[in-house]
Image (spheres, rainbow, N blue to C red):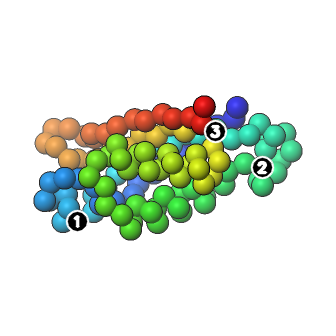
Amino acid sequence: MDFIFIEDMRVEAHVGIYPRERAAPQSLEIGLTFGVPDEAARDDDIAKTIDYAAVIDRIRRELASRHFNLLETLGEYVIALMLDEFGAPWVKISIAKVGIAKGVRRVGVQIERSRT
């Protein structure tokens, strides 16, 4: 299986349980790796792979229009998009809040799922 990765994607999202987190969007860093069919590279055909530009656009649009209490829920939502709508056989995501706690650069989650 081949993989596509997207690293350090910055997004603004409504996520959190505290009043300050509900009042305004927060900066998140997202890392995403997902499996793609081997034949895409063999055939040099974009139609046989997953268009990373479409993935980035879709994630940005979805996160701009929703609120999630937990990063875990946000991660599961993105993974479901990748598995169900984009047809990825395997997905790993890391999501981090940036500068959320004093003396801590990032706080986040990592989730990995596959179709099987």
SS label for mark 1:
loop
Q: Which residue is mark 2?
A: 48
Numbered badge on residue 89: 3
Numbered badge on residue 24: 1
Image position of 113 (left or right of 76): right
The three-letter code of the residue at mark 2 reads Lys
The three-letter code of the residue at mark 3 reads Pro
Image position of 8 (left or right of 81): left
SS label for mark 3:
loop
Question: In this view of the protein, which residue sits in the foreground, 1 or 31?
Answer: 1
Q: Earlier in the sequence, mark 2 or mark 1?
A: 1
**Image quarter (top left, top right, bottom left or bottom right) of the N terminus:** top right
Label 3 crowding class (10 Å Cα cut-off): few <14, some 14-19, many 20+? some
Locate residue 66, reporting x and y percent. Answer: 36, 64
Question: In this view of the protein, which residue sits in the foreground, 64 or 29?
Answer: 64
Locate residue 68, reporting x and y percent. Answer: 31, 55
The three-letter code of the residue at mark 1 reads Ala
Q: Earlier in the sequence, mark 3 or mark 1?
A: 1
Mark 3 vs mark 1, CA separation in Å: 34 Å
Mark 2 vs mark 1, CA separation in Å: 39 Å
Mark 3 vs mark 2, CA separation in Å: 13 Å
Residue at the spot 51% in from the left edge and 35% down from the top edge: 113
Numbered badge on residue 72: none
Mark whose residue sits in front, 3 or 2: 3
